[in-house]
Amino acid sequence: MGFVGTAVKRKEDFRFLTGGGTYTDDINRPGQVHAYVVRSPHAHANIKKIDKSAAEKAPGVVAIFTGADYAADKKGGLPCGWLIHSKDGTPMVEPPHPPLVADRVRHVGDQVAVVIAETRDQAKSAAELIDVQYQELPAIISTGDAAKPNAPQVWEQAKNNTCYDWHLGDKAATDAAFAKASHVTKIDIVNQRLIPNAMEPRAAIGDFDRATGDYTLYTTSQNPHVIRLLMGAFVLQIPEHKLRVVAPDVGGGFGSKIFHYAEEAIVTWAAGKLGRPIKWTADRSESFMSDCHGRDHVTHAELAMDKDGKFLGLKVSTTAAMGAYLSTFASSVPTYLYATLLAGVYATPAIYAEVRAVFTNTVPVDAYRGAGRPEATYLLERLVDKAAREMKMDRVEIRRKNMIPANAFPYQTPVALQYDSGDYQSTLEMALKASDYAGFEKRRTDAKAKGKLRGIGISTYLEACGIAPSAVAGALGARAGLYESAEVRVHPTGSVTVFTGSHSHGQGHETTFAQIVADTLGVPMESVEISHGDTNKVQFGMGTYGSRSLAVGGSALVKALDKVVTKAKRIAAHLMEASVADIEFKDGAFKVAGTDKSVPFGQVALTAYVPHNYPITELEPGLDEKAFYDPLNFTFPGGCHICEVEVDPETGVVQVVKFTAVDDVGKVINPMIVEGQVQGGIAQGIGQALIENCVYDNKTGQLLTGSYMDYTMPRADDVPSYDVQTHNTMCTHNPLGSKGVGEVGAIGSPPAVINAVLDALGPVGVSDITMPASPHRVWQAINTVKAAAE
Amino acid sequence: MPTVSMTVNGKAVSADVETRTLLVHYLRESLGLTGTHVGCDTSQCGACVVHVDGKSVKSCTMLAAQAQGAKVATIEGLATDGKLHPMQEAFRDNHGLQCGFCTPGMVMSAIDLVQNNASPSEHDVREWLEGNICRCTGYHNIVKAILAGAQAMRK
């Protein structure tokens, strides 16, 4: 008891620390064969001919399937789960997305064929014998150039490569705000493409039981039920009761394992054809060119202010890359997860945002940790800093002046969202104090004496998560509900199994959810097991992304626990011959108020399953309750991140020397896990700000950053230790009061880092830099200014 | 196919393997020791670190045949009778893992660090971890765990 709010050590750690985790590639099925996917080496080309005759004769080869085979089976393509309408009311362009392409490849890595052999090495060797003749076509890679009139076209049906041209906000009100402005600050921003790189490469095993006709897919997914729904209903036409999807231990996701991927459909479909289990595991280099990428926005924005620096209006125009196909949630990211966040923590009265989504001959882009919200935050916080410089105002002062005050909640923004709670002033003041902001100038001077340029940067951010109220999401184009489910199964001896539709791939649900159960039912943590990731065990689930597990999945758990307690009270009342209204439940025992009569929880559980003395005419036996929870609103974590950097002007190397985060995440169940989530997010944010960058050759469409040798992952010596604190206001509309913590680190941190870099470089005359602020770019920026001055 | 014999976690093992079989695949597929993971194909990520004759090695850069006659230790062999090695314990106490995928490599690498440097500084730990990538933790708690684990191993 008293587990909630304490740093309980994780239940799941023992198996992970002893090599006992079960990740998808650790699973082997009897009779299993192995798949290797043949991928396009070209960004854009027609497939003229595929000669697989030599490969078919290679040792161990069981079968080779191409896009033509898939098409002949009349199976479907991978669907997009969110329909966006353009300004003119027309629906977005949704091109076909077959798991194996038959006629034309549209990005390097596109799936052309699959080789299935007895061993993985045999499949790989045979794949090299497949002769695919391509007719190369011009490719469009650059996001900013995709909609230009003469750009090569990815899809005939998408004129100017435009998927949709969408807007949000009141244009007339925003124009009026700009008309009365005394100053307008303008900025051009690129939010570069990133590659998520969860450490476990994606994997999938398709299995088909010939006796029953049942399919099983083991896959590296954040949401197995969503995969079952999409693959079953839309792609392979397998009814849900004949399709089981298992997402066992999953080695990180960060969004990249939300989506329904081609390989999942390929191995399941082929397993049905061959009657043998088929395993596919990505090489890391395949992950780089087949896992969905993130971000990739090009934006122009303008902020109108009065003479005192009060924000009057904001105009934003963004081009967002979708890649070559629409991935599962791609269309929602630069719209409802981005433009709705453009008020941030500020009381800007008028906002108008236009977003054009474009197809390019690149890997599809979809949600990556933060998804849309980091892009909005980066834009706003860079813009606010620039506005402060132009207005000759202090960076902190301009933020204080424009923040939504703590007494203004609920607060309706001009871009659709209604914030329920927050206290941005306090998180700002706490972060200023914790980072010793006041003492910074001395540190700058000290650094200068060592030949270093030191800078400090602030980001005051807000995000919307706890995704999402189904009705709202549906009105905005979601083709799914976004509730969560939980089942609390109390066993006869009083131990408990929880089945949750949330999915843990590092978040620690087996611990945090058990803390809630242990406290609510008064049972030991050891008596609680959290089960997730198997559609045959869990009734239903929408999975884990958008920092939704605790706020939505945890709330479903609370609802199911309430039902358990309500029923148990009736059983206890019967056992003690008392009125239900007089039963109190505390510390694991049911008591009759005002008496010393009491029965422990375990006895009530046993009675439920051995109902000899039981109100059998009024109550069913058993103690197993289910609940679905659909949130009433999004949740709104926020806070302040302050970063301090030192730049070596000789080499351009930026070192983060200090990072302070004060976040408001609502009710905390386990502070140790909360800190860990924030720390991990900050590292990804520092990665984006300073070193990570997905680079394509603009002409050929070759992925230049296709391995860990080229794509710079943050390593231990790239990041500092972090000072992470919370200042929590409660979410007002869910039973836990929790807001979510998975994404705050990645959302709040990049602008804090870049604002710090620009603060450091300000004295040498550099006023702009594009992420990542790599040594090369920083050195170049310094020396360009120097050369101009000379 | 050559026969390869070695000692893994104290047990003598022997199997016929293809000459191109990597040590990591031998451990995972022939011996079923799936605690050692494969996170990349360029020997960068360190998820596959094991000990070969007492030294940390990326088992994806070594052929199984090269380990002929060697003493190999994997994450599965660290805990004895259900009691965690002090470094494993330190990772648990300091929340040095989230998804757990990089963890076996991290722990094996950390133990070798302490074998080389009994009292590493934070800087030493961060430098040593150059060959181990984690995407979840931001390294803060891994570094804390290794410093605590080093202290516990000194006792």
Image: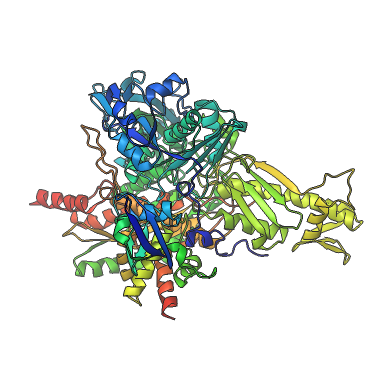
Q: Residue at x 34, y 55 (%)?
A: B3
Task: Give A468 or A448, whichever is nearer the viewer.
Answer: A468
Compared with residue A316, is residue A777 higher up or lower down, i.e. above or below? below
Q: Is residue A426 left or right of residue A186?
A: right
Is residue A644 at least partly visible in the picture?
A: no
Task: Give A92 or A485, whichever is nearer the viewer.
Answer: A485
Compared with residue A620, is residue A397 higher up or lower down, i.e. above or below? below
| Quadrant placement of the N terminus of chain A | bottom right
Q: Residue at x 63, y 63 (%)?
A: A3
Q: Is residue A60 left or right of residue A230?
A: left
x and y percentages locating residue B25 in the rendered image: 37, 52
Q: Residue furthest bottom?
A: B155
Task: Give B93 or A585, whichever is nearer the viewer.
Answer: B93
The number of numbered badges drawn on the structure is: 0
Coloring scheme used: rainbow
Compared with residue A233, is residue A503 higher up or lower down, i.e. above or below? below
x and y percentages locating residue B88 in the rendered image: 47, 67
x and y percentages locating residue A615 in the rendered image: 89, 48
